Amino acid sequence: MNKATFGAGCFWGIEADFRNTKGVTATAVGYEGGDLDRPSYQDVCTGRTGHAEVVEVIFDPEQTNFAALLDIFWQSHDPTTLNRQGPDVGPQYRSVIFFHNEEQRILAETSKEALNTTGRFAGLIVTEISPAMAFFRAEEYHQQYLEKQGVASCLTSTPVRRSAY
């Protein structure tokens, strides 16, 4: 099994996108990239800990790969907005890829550069690409939050559907 870690604003929606992906064996939402040891949701919400809301993805490399997960990441949010996704504002909502090895770093940087040249996004991608740090699992009520609420996304009350990924 391999591990990947992504931050794309609020962790609830992207966690559901990854969890419903073939080859992903586990997901957990949490906090990464900050200075405080074992931060709580309340700590991270202040925007002063340096942590981002992230999803940790465990995947079977025989069924999917990091490049496929990157595709989901880029499709799941707007990587051109600094410290913001929709109504969520602050450094904890930044777009970030925490790489776990050199291959992931190269793939992340290459895909970011390639997307910047396609014109797919109106602005330049501001996604941070950084080495993985300590991951702190979020409180249990955040885990698989959308599924627990019976909704498909943070923006609608549509019943949950399996993604096509």
Image (tube, helix red, strand yellow):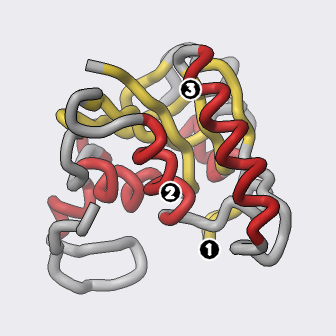
**In the picture provided, is 88 more to the left or to the right than 6?**
right
Q: Are marks 1 and 3 in contact (CB under 8 Å)?
A: no
In the image, residue 132 sits, relative to residue 67, either above or below, namely above
User: Which label belongs to residue 37?
Assistant: none
Measured as percent of width and height from the top left, residue 113 is found at: 77, 48
76 versus 45 height, above or below = below
- What residue type is disc 3 on? Gln
Q: Please give the name of the residue rendered at 17% of the width and 73% of the height, measured from the top-left corner.
A: 160
Looking at numbered disc 2 in the image, what kind of residue is underneath it? Cys
The spot of residue 103 in percent (x, y) is 57, 21
Nearer the observer, 122 or 98: 122
Label 3: which residue? 104
Frontmost of labels 1 and 3 is 3
Number of other residues with Cα within 10 Å of mark 2, as a class: few under 14, some 14 to 19, many 20 or more = many
CA–CA distance in space, label 1 to label 3: 27 Å
Look at mark 1 in the image and give the residue it sits on: 86
User: Could you tell which of marks 2 and 1 lies nearer the N-terminus?
Assistant: 2
Quadrant holding the N terminus: top left
The tag earlier along the polypeptide, 2 or 3, is 2
- Specify the amino acid type for callout 1: Gly
> How would you rate the neighbour count of disc 3 (Cα within 10 Å): few for under 14, some for 14-19, many for 20 or more?
many
SS for callout 1 = loop
Earlier-in-chain disc, 1 versus 3: 1
Label 3, secondary structure: give it: helix
Whole-percent x and y of residue 64?
29, 39
Snapshot quadrant of residue 107:
top right
Residue at 71 percent across and 59 percent down: it is: 115
| Distance between mark 2 and mark 3 Cα atoms | 22 Å
Residue 89 in sight: no
The x and y percentages for residue 96 are: 64, 41
- Residue 57 placement: quadrant: top left
Residue position for label 2:
10
